[in-house]
Amino acid sequence: MTEDDSADDDWFESALDDEEAEDTGSDRQDGDRADGESGEAGDWTDDVEDSGGDWMDDIDSEGDGVDAGDDAGGAFGGSDAGSDTNGSALDDSDSGGGAFGEDSDGGAFGDDSDGGAFGADSGDGAFGDDSGGAFDSGGGDSPFGDSGGDSPFEEDFGSAFQSGGDDEFDDEDFESDIPRIDLGIEGLDNMIQGGVPARHLMVVIGSAGTGKTTFGLQFLYHGLQNDENAVFITLEQSHEAIIDTANEWGWNFDEYEAENKLAVVDLDPVEMANSLDNIRGELPQLIEDFDADRLVLDSVSLLEMMYNDPAKRRTEVFDFTRSLKEAGVTTFLTSEASETNPYASRHGIIEYLTDAVFILQYVRGDTTETRLAVEIQKIRNANHSREKKPYEITSDGLSVYQQANIF
């Protein structure tokens, strides 16, 4: 081997030794770095365990923390440890104060909690099944409890609205300072305690064929039978037609007229509208001179139709009804019903100007025959039934079946 070859081998071996040394140094450095990092992390973890544990223990001792461990009050702890400590916010365990704790004593949503707001078995929970909450089905004082002793909505609450078949009032003990009269309609008078106050202004509203005119004639006939004087003003029929109709019922209006107990006046509605001011001024005096106790106007709807302007119509009708009330006579008006509402008059005025409103209407069913029904809508200063009762137009006039009901 030449000197050059020996030098080359020495260079090669030297290079290998240097490379191994570099590899060894690199490994040593990597290991040291890893050990250093591991050591630092371990030291940080230990510090946290030493210091942080004390911090969390301090918080847990107050019951306000968010402990992940087994202490009572842990937020989501699943163990049973520390169940004697109350106050945790979100514990799933059996802790004493977990918000979602199934067995917690004060959890807001605990299933078995004693004070949880939504606890199923809670004693004080707002929605607990066994609680005294607002919607508890078994709570003693629950306003909606099925068996609550003080509940206003017990199973028999409908009895408060049940109406008996007999609406007849006991008038024997009825006392009133207001003079009262009967209408003379069988069954209907029994639906009014004490009778209608005298000098009231009444109206009956109904469609064609419900018996409005018959109602008015029967009202007058009852007064005539009790030695009262009566006036019948018709805007639809003649004097003779009214007398003949009443005589067909057997009410002998011609005889009462001959005795000056009854006056039947037929007026043309156009003439009445044109001279309403004069009539309104003279009517109270005529009623006083005739000493009338009862008056019927059939019908006020024709008088209302004479005025196209709604404001004018209301003013004229109001002034006319006021003059009747000032005359001191008990007045009965008839009115056509609205085409769309059986409880309103055609023009929707007269029911607001009168003291009493009676509704006559047809009741039509799918399987039953058409029937007639009467209802008292209002009577001022009188207690009355509000039930709808069937009636018929018989040979004796209108007869209300006060014991029957409309189905």
Image: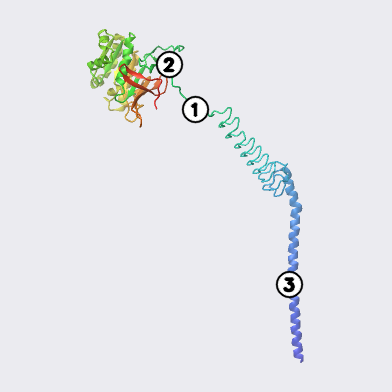
Residue in the image at 25% along x and 8% along y: 258
Marks 2 and 3, how far apart at CA: 116 Å
Mark 2 near mark 1, Cβ–Cβ under 8 Å?
no
**Is residue 348 something that shows in the picture?**
no
Q: Looking at the image, is mark 2 or mark 3 earlier in the sequence? A: 3
- Which quarter of the rendering shows the N terminus? bottom right
* Residue with the most extreme front position: 367
Inspect the image, locate mark 2, and give the three-letter code of the amino acid beneath it: Gln
Inspect the image, locate mark 3, and give the three-letter code of the amino acid beneath it: Ser
Q: Which mark is residue 343?
A: none
Q: Which mark is residue 193?
A: 2
Q: Residue 179: where, in percent of width, then height? A: 40, 11
Q: Residue 155: where, in percent of width, then height? A: 53, 29
Marks 3 and 1, how far apart at CA: 94 Å
Establish if 76 lies above or below 260: below
Marks 2 and 1, how far apart at CA: 25 Å
| Residue bearing the label numbered 1 | 158
Left or right of residue 301, residue 3 in this image: right
Q: Residue 329: where, in percent of width, then height? A: 34, 13
Q: Secondary structure at mark 2?
A: loop
For label 3, the crowd category at 10 Å Cα-Cα, with few meaning under 14, some 14 to 19 and many 20 or more, is few
In front: 392, or 312?
392
Between marks 2 and 3 in the image, the one whose residue lies nearer the viewer: 2
Between marks 2 and 1 in the image, the one whose residue lies nearer the viewer: 1
Left or right of residue 296, residue 88 in this image: right
In front: 205, or 33?
205
Inspect the image, locate mark 1, and give the three-letter code of the amino acid beneath it: Gly
Residue 73: image quadrant is: top right
Residue in the image at 74% along x and 87% along y: 8
Q: Which mark is residue 26?
A: 3
Q: Looking at the image, is mark 3 or mark 1 earlier in the sequence? A: 3
In front: 214, or 27?
214
